[in-house]
Image (cartoon, coloured by chain):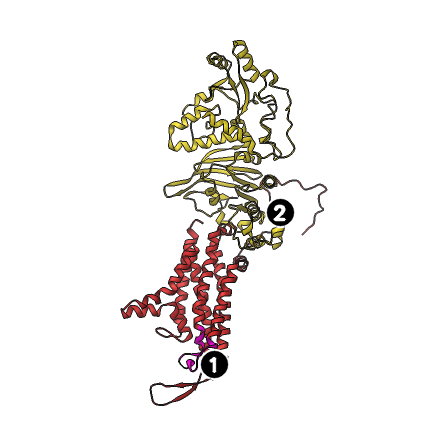
Chain colours: A yellow, B red
Amino acid sequence: MIEAVGLTKRYGVKTAVDNLTFQVRPGAVTGFLGPNGSGKSTTMRMILGLDAPTSGQVTVGGRRFRDLPNAPRQVGALLDAKAVHGGRSARQHLLCLAQLSGIPARRVDEVLGVVGLQEVAHRRSKGFSLGMGQRLGIAGALLGDPQVLLFDEPVNGLDPEGIHWVRNLMRKLAGEGRTVFVSSHLMSEMALTADHLIVIGRGQLLADMSVKDFIARNSAGYARVRTPETSEKLVRALSEAGAHVQPEQDGALRVSGLALPHISDLAFDLGVRLHELSPHQASLEEAYMRMTQAAVDYRSTQDQRFGLQQAGPVPAQAQYGGYPPPHAAPQHQWQPAPGPNPYQTAPPPQGFGAPPAGPVGVSPAGPHPGAMAPPVAAPPTAVPPAVPPPPQDAPPAPAAAPSLSKRESES
Amino acid sequence: MTHYPAPAQAPLPAPPGAYSSPIPVVRTHLGHAIASEWTKIRTVRSTLWSLGVMFLLVVGIGMLMTGTVGENEYEYSPILSFGLPGVLLGQLCIVTLGVLVITSEYGTGMIRTTFTASPQRGRVLAAKAIVFFLVTFTLSTLACTIVALLNKAALEGRSINRFDGSAEHQVDTASASMGEFLRATVGVGLFMALLGLLSLAVGVLLRHSAGAITSMLGVVLLPLLASLFISQISVKEKLQEYSMPNLVGQLYGVPIHGDDGGWGLLGLLGLVTAGMLGAAYAVLRGRDV
């Protein structure tokens, strides 16, 4: 259990971490998200007693890190894969750490096996790739078989196999009842690994909730509708039917809260021709970026934040406290969260919530077999996914990529 | 202890928060830190290089001096003093290693790993100081003893013609007393180890290899160099007296200025080193890594 209360760190006039209060519970993987420079590493260093907080405090298992009698047996940490003297071999490096906390040398060979570095145990770590360095760092964290584990960007530099391994390792560690706290700037990665999310931006807490809640609140579906005719009539009809309609930059409409066949029927009744009617999924990555972007803009220009909140159907900030939305009303016209996504023919993004096997790369496409087909071909329910999720673990990147490009066009 | 029969089923997964390691947890103490620092110091090449070069310089130059000592040259200086040039060069290796013992950890980021593994920073610093002191003291004393024994073997017993101003012509034999021998071996070994510790303290304070080594070279060389350019006699003499080469010179019985056998200056170096280590500890405790 890690507990931060009012944790603050200032460097001169710059506030790196601003009044953070959170808890990291055992038995779960807690993701620590934020863009570069948001204060993740500073927070981790304060947890480990490397940096002293300007105010507030953070404890591990009820004690400050520096008061722990044998710290590595209670807290293991990977801060930086390259925080190693390159002149020592992997084994010697781990041995000197083991001796420092009275861990038998046998254990060094055990963890070298766990991270798969037995073959290069006697090679100097100077020649290690970034991925091998990460494995060595993870070995160092596991050395004391601790109850609390901290990993700062552990998948940096790892190949897909390594990423898969880290993901499973963390879930396994959490499954054993340990506290696992993992920082990342990749939402897609965290969505696969973590049970709980703590999101910070500019050193401030933006969200502290379970991944399930985060998905329910932020991963919203919508339809893109394009008509060659004037859209006024259609917009009015859609709004009357309870949809939330926004114009997109390229002239299309972004409609949320209404099933595709329903939109099609409405258009048919009005005699409006449709050139496009396609389902879209606002990804977690998008929601996350919107959230953190808002935090950055909060400090510089009030107007931009206002604009951002108006822009999307996703009420990015309404729930998190600390950022009372200036206009709450428009955001609540449309409520996607409680029910299942109207565009999903399969259960909502199972790939995100499911343990490691979740095929994120495929899930956005999977539930929408007829993405460009006429709406009648895609009844809202009872059609099984045309593309079954592949057994292997797809890399997370493809899930985010399409929605990122969309995001650019909409802003 | 009672042994219970193993449960028929596999043990249930531990409930959240209940993970406890099967590896016994020990209470850590300075001994653990010393073992760790010993592993660290013997597994990097800079140690081997610095100490190897120091050893070669002290012994090599010592042998060279003894072998090439001219006719009657030993008449003017104590026979053990031919070890001095080697030590004057060898001390620079000790300075380098003393600095690197800590700055290499800052340079590579290893210091964060170290302080995560042992948040008791004072203990880590103490272990580093103890291990480094013992290693350098042992090796420098060994090197100096080899040179001193060589000098004794080669030069002791030769006859010396002393002309002490009076018309009387004395004939004497060259020898080294026990006190001289101790100063040229254990004394010089202590000097090297203390100089190394001072370098370590400066390394902790500055955290940068180049900066700390340069500062220490300044401490070792500057006072004597500066004294060459200062005409005011009192200042000049003070600078010479408290310069490091004068300390080594006194230990070998060939002082530049003043002579108390070197122990007084060695004590002073010990005090300064202790003070600097204290300052290093205070800074290390409060500073963000």
| As drawn, B33 above or below A26 | below
Residue B155, disc: 1
| As drawn, A363 above or below B3 | above
Callout 1 amino acid: Leu
Separation (CA) of disc 1 from disc 2: 61 Å
A76 left or right, relative to B289: right
Residue B243 point in image, percent of width and height? 36, 68
B89 left or right, relative to B165: right
| As drawn, A148 above or below A387 | below
- Identify the chain of the residue marked 2, using the numbered disc in the image: A
Q: How many marks?
A: 2
**Is A25 part of what is drawn in magenta?**
no
Determine whether the residue tagged by mark 2 lies in a helix, strand or loop. Answer: loop
User: Can residue A350 be seen?
Assistant: yes
Residue depicted at x 48% and y 77%: B67
- Identify the chain of the residue marked 1, using the numbered disc in the image: B
Residue A6 point in image, percent of width and height? 43, 39
**Is B78 part of what is drawn in magenta?**
yes
Foreground label between 1 and 2: 1
> Magenta part of the protein: which range?
B65-83
User: Can residue B262 be seen?
Assistant: no
Nearest the eye: B287 or B203: B203
Determine whether label 1 and label 2 are within 8 Å by CB: no
| As drawn, A207 above or below A147 | above
Residue A116, disc: 2
Neighbor class of circle 1 (other Cα within 10 Å; few <14, some 14-19, many 20+) is many
Callout 2 amino acid: Gly
Residue A268 point in image, percent of width and height? 55, 11
Q: In the orientation shown, which residue stands out farthest toward the left? A: B232
